[in-house]
Image: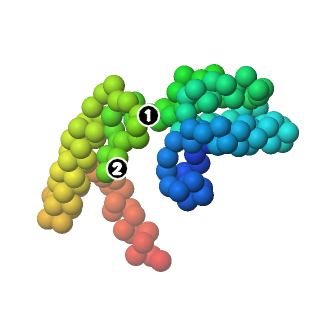
Amino acid sequence: FAVQGHVGMVPSLSTQYGGIRTLGKTAEEAMKILKDMKRLEDAGAFGAEVECVAEDALIEIKKHTSLVINSLGAGSGGDVIFLFFEDICGETSGMKTPRHAKSWGNGKAIKEELNAERSRAIKGFKDEVDNSTYPDSDHVVQMLPGEKDQLLEKLDSL
């Protein structure tokens, strides 16, 4: 199996670091990140997502690992530069955008417009169902001529 690990700032473990913050700003933190990478290598991982690590630390650490490095908020020192689709498209809402994130679009406005249109459509559907104007004759299929009478006869004989 191809396995990738996660080192640096792991959001679910951020309380260990005093909250969500960039790691590797000290030599001690950078060495701990390398140690974590070595543990991944020993376990057979092919790569690691390195999240929120000082760029210059990652550039130096990478020289000492065989892992494929996916940089998320760790600068240009990785083999792959990773960013969430929602950040790239500008769809992030309801939270502070991370320092490393950049948007090249305004997806948030489009999502808000789409959600408003969806709400209007759902309301229209509900209103027509409630007042029995949907479904109408344009949106249903009836039995073939004479078939309903045959069905009723068969049902009556049950």
Q: Residue 34, position in %: x, y? A: 73, 37
Judging depth in this view, the residue of 57 and 49 nearest the camera is 57
Name the residue located 47 percent from the left edge and 35 percent from the top edge. Answer: 84
Quadrant in which the N terminus appears: top right
Q: Give the labeled residue for mark 2.
A: 95
Q: Is residue 11 above or below residue 113?
A: below
Name the residue located 33 percent from the left edge and 62 percent from the top edge. Answer: 149
Give the spatial CA distance, label 1 vs label 2.
14 Å
- Classify residue 23 as left or right of residue 60: left
Quarter of the rendering containing residue 100: top left
Name the residue located 59 percent from the left edge and 48 percent from the top edge. Answer: 10
- Classify residue 104 as left or right of residue 17: left
Q: Residue 65, position in %: x, y? A: 76, 28
Q: Residue 33, position in %: x, y? A: 68, 40
**Secondary structure type for disc 1:** loop
Q: Earlier in the sequence, mark 1 or mark 2?
A: 2
Q: Is residue 65 above or below residue 11?
A: above
Q: Give the labeled residue for mark 1.
A: 100
Three-letter residue code for mark 2: Met
Quarter of the rendering containing residue 50: top right
Q: Is residue 121 above or below residue 5?
A: below
Three-letter residue code for mark 1: His
Q: Is residue 3 visible?
A: no
Q: How is the image coloured?
A: rainbow
Labelled disc at residue 87 = none
For label 1, the crowd category at 10 Å Cα-Cα, with few meaning under 14, some 14 to 19 and many 20 or more, is few
